């Protein structure tokens, strides 16, 4: 697919303000996340129905939306949260909330990602919310992805970190084994995600488990891989977001890049 690029290596006014206060020599990863998030919120207009993402980057965007509502600079926003955690954050900020039963078409969603490839395909779900994120971000007119530059990869799986798959708890070992076998040629290792809090299987907002897939090599055709995963009984959804992002905002040491698809 042909891509159109709008690129700027100059810090925006918002980014410049964040960089300037307090004075510091090195921006932390969290500073970069905040810069990307604030830039994304510039796309938000009063009256919009908004998908509210999950994770440490999206959290900054939601805080900013709450702040602009409080200041009266935004009004009549309806937020659709992608997780119970985001739901709680948005409630605390007095952002009016709804769901996709009531609002099946959203104006805009803002969310982070774990990996972004050169075609703006994503890995999401290391925060555990991939199913609701995919349902909600799949019905947005515009899906703005916000990342710091560490999330950019040459190919999906290229970070060496997990590509999450949400599965039903029933006979999870069977499903994990099937997933691993599917990507044998890519040296795939499938691991059940364990919650660091209690040492038990991590349970998603939907009552499911997550199997994290680690690849040693490029898995090739992402659509074919995604379809093969979804054909396995026991799989609920995978964390590859193929051809869904419409805008990518990357914050790095040299400034902010905005790229439209
Ligand atoms: O997909 C996600 C949650 O399911 C997050 O967007 C993703 O994990 C990125 O998180 P962070 O902004 O904390 O790096």
Image: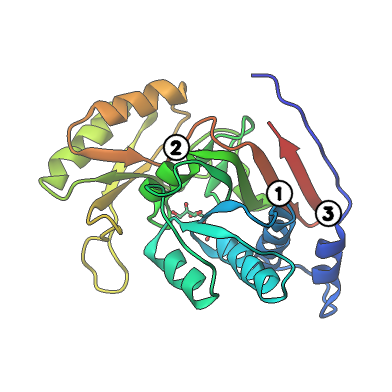
Examine the image and state in which quarter residue 184 appears. Answer: top left
**Which residue does the numbered mark 3 point to in the structure image?**
254
- Which residue is found at the position 30% from the left and 59% from the top? 205
Q: Nearer the viewer, mark 3 or mark 2?
A: 2
SS label for mark 3: loop
Marks 1 and 2: in contact by CB < 8 Å? Answer: no
Position of residue 130 in the picture relative to residue 110 (left or right): left
Percent x, y of residue 155: 55, 33
Q: In the rendered image, which quarter contains the N terminus?
A: top right
How much space separates mark 2 and mark 1, taking CA atoms? 19 Å
How much space separates mark 1 and mark 3, taking CA atoms? 10 Å
Examine the image and state in which quarter residue 175 appears. Answer: top left
- Residue 231 appearing in the image: yes
Tell which circle, 3 or 2, labels the residue nearer the N-terminal end.
2
Q: Residues within 10 Å of mark 1 (few under 14, many from 20)?
A: many
**Which residue does the numbered mark 2 point to in the structure image?**
240
Q: Nearer the viewer, mark 1 or mark 3?
A: 1
Q: Which mark is residue 250?
A: 1
Q: Is residue 49 above or below residue 184?
A: below
- Which residue is found at the position 22% from the left and 57% from the top? 207
SS label for mark 1: strand
- Which residue is found at the position 48% from the left and 29% from the top? 218
Percent x, y of residue 233: 17, 32
**In-front residue for pair 40/149:** 40
SS label for mark 2: strand
Percent x, y of residue 111: 56, 52
Tell which circle, 2 or 1, labels the residue nearer the N-terminal end.
2
Q: Is residue 113 above or below residue 158?
A: below
């Amino acid at each position: 697919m042909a891509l159109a690029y709008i690129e700027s290596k100059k810090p925006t006014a918002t980014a410049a303000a964040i960089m300037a206060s307090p004075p510091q020599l090195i921006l932390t990863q969290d500073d970069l996340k905040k810069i990307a998030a604030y830039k994304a919120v510039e796309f938000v207009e009063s009256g919009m129905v908004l998908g509210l993402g999950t994770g440490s980057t999206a959290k900054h965007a939601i805080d900013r939306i709450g702040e602009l509502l409080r200041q009266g600079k935004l009004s009549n926003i309806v937020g659709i949260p992608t997780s119970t955690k985001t739901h709680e954050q948005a409630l605390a900020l007095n952002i009016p909330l709804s769901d996709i039963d009531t609002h099946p078409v959203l104006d805009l969603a803002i969310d982070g990602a774990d990996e972004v490839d050169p075609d703006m395909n994503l890995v999401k779900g290391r925060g555990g919310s991939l199913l609701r994120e995919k349902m909600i971000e799949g019905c947005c007119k515009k899906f703005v992805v916000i990342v710091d530059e560490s999330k950019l990869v040459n190919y999906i799986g290229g970070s060496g970190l997990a590509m999450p798959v949400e599965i039903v708890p029933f006979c999870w070992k069977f499903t994990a084994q099937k997933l691993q076998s599917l990507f044998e040629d890519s040296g795939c290792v499938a691991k059940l995600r364990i919650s660091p809090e209690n040492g038990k299987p991590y349970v998603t907002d939907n009552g499911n488990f997550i199997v994290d897939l680690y690849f040693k090599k490029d898995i090739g055709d992402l659509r074919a891989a995604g379809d093969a995963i979804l054909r396995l009984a026991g799989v609920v959804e995978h964390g590859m977001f193929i051809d869904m992002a419409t805008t990518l905002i990357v914050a790095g040491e040299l400034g902010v890049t905005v790229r439209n698809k």
